Image (cartoon, rainbow, N blue to C red):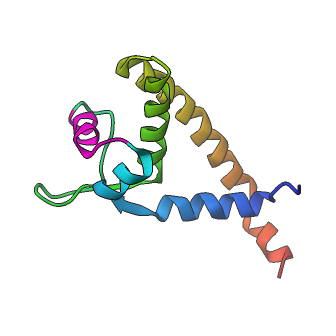
């Protein structure tokens, strides 16, 4: 099986970051009830993209990934607080790696493919 090229990974990452879904869809995707998602947001664990009070909550890929990781750790027996700490550490490392990947795929690389 071939490894994806850096440009493909960067594109996928950019594409995923543009995906935005409502709280109901997030609940279906993650298996976490909307009530629990709202609670986590109230606790400051999640941050929806909703700017106005009373508007539907919307979430991006980063939030969905965070919910999935927290749920996975809680299913393994971690407390919410411990799961959040562990997930935030993991996501920080992941985001740094993805950022480096984005920086490594320079505009010159894309010119060569034309």
User: Is residue 25 within the magenta segment?
Assistant: no
Q: Is residue 6 above or below residue 99?
A: below
Give left or right: position of 86 versus 45: right
Residue drawn at (49%, 44%), measured in percent from left and top?
65
Question: Where are the magenta residues, as a range?
Answer: 32-42
Give left or right: position of 113 versus 77: right
**Residue lying farthest to the bottom in this orientation:** 114
Q: Quadrant of the C terminus?
A: bottom right
Q: Identify the image quadrant of residue 82.
A: top left
Residue drawn at (43%, 24%), measured in percent from left and top?
74
Q: Is residue 83 above or below residue 52?
A: above
Q: Residue 70, percent across and down?
A: 44, 31
Q: Residue 29, percent across and down?
A: 43, 52
Residue drawn at (61%, 38%), measured in percent from left and top?
94
Q: Identify the image quadrant of residue 108.
A: bottom right
Which is nearer the eye, 98 or 1?
1
Q: Identify the image quadrant of residue 38.
A: top left
Which is nearer the eye, 30 or 58?
30
Give left or right: position of 10 versus 86: right
Q: Is residue 80 above or below residue 110?
A: above
Q: Residue 44, percent across and down?
A: 27, 33
């Amino acid at each position: 099986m071939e490894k994806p090229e850096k440009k493909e990974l960067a594109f996928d990452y950019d594409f995923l970051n543009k995906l935005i879904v409502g709280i109901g869809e997030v609940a279906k995707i993650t298996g976490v009830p909307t009530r629990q998602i709202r609670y986590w947001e109230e606790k400051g664990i999640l941050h929806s993209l909703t700017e106005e009070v009373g508007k539907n909550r919307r979430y991006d890929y980063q939030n969905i990934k965070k919910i999935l990781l927290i749920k996975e750790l809680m299913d393994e027996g971690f407390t919410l607080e411990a799961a959040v700490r562990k997930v935030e550490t993991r996501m920080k490392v992941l985001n740094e790696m993805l950022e480096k990947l984005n920086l490594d795929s320079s505009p010159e690389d894309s010119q060569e493919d034309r």
